[in-house]
Amino acid sequence: MTDVADEAIRRAIVEPLIEYNVARSGRHDFRPLVLAIEDDHGVVVGGLWGRTSFDWLFVELLFVPEPLRGRGLGAELMSRAEAEAVARGCHGAWLDTFEFQARGFYERLGYQCFGQLPDYPVGSARFFMRKMLPWSLAFALTLSLPFVEDHAFTVLAASLPLIAFVHATYGFDMLFRILAVAAAVIFVATACLPARLPAPAMA
């Protein structure tokens, strides 16, 4: 037993574990996701450290220096990380935070607590939070419409302001319910639509 963090020991433990996970899941899509805040001299003074795997973004670390707070940098870092996660095919994001840290901040960004450890430390708690990424849901809905699949990105771009408004006004729960209902309606509607006819050949 030791309290020395030997990276060689960690590699000896984690590498066979990764091999096991890949063999059982058939997935090997772990990718770091890092956004750095630099000062005027190019020195990193904060940022976001996370990773994507198994269709989820995990935000491990987020820090904005005290002099730079109140400018929306934290929200911007989260937004950029979420956008990159969607581009990588993720449908959700999760993280953890302490009671004395930033639960309220993450809730304002649409995250919800799905678990907690009380007395961590004693008299406080550690919260585990998640968020389904609405852009990913909207994109999936768009592609499911046969009659707009040729204009998927146009429809998605047009829907983003409405998605943002519902999310900001009514919260993520209402947004998710609306998207779920829309998905069900679209599924039924598309199932009832006739198959597309091939385009006539041009002489």
Image: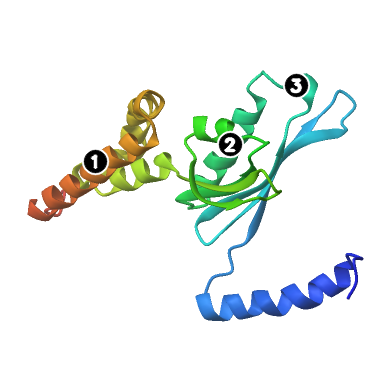
Residue nearest the viewer, comparing 120 with 141: 120
**Rendered position, 129 above or below 71:** below
Q: CA distance from mark 2 to mark 1?
A: 39 Å
Tell whether label 1 touches label 2 (CB within 8 Å). Answer: no
Give the x, y percent position of residue 24. Answer: 53, 80
Q: Residue at x 26, y 38 (%)?
A: 178
Which residue has dot 3 on it?
A: 68
- Rendered image: mark on residue 103: 2
Q: Is residue 172 left or right of residue 95?
A: left
Name the secondary structure under disc 1: helix
Residue 127: percent from left, percent from top: 58, 47
The answer for how far apart the CA atoms under marks 3 and 1 are is 43 Å
Kindly state the secondary structure of the residue where label 2 is placed.
helix
Image x and y of residue 119, in percent:
65, 50
Amino acid beneath label 1 = Val
Q: Compare marks 2 and 1 and give the one earlier in the sequence.
A: 2
Residues at badges 3 and 1 in contact (C-beta under 8 Å)? Answer: no
Instruction: Name the mark nearer the viewer: 3 or 1.
Output: 3
Number of the label disc, if any, that sits on residue 97: none
Sequence-first disc among 2 and 3: 3
Contact, mark 2 vs mark 3 (Cβ under 8 Å): no
Q: Amino acid at mark 3?
A: Leu
Binning the other alpha carbons within 10 Å of mark 2 as few (below 14), some (14 to 19) or many (20 upward) gives some
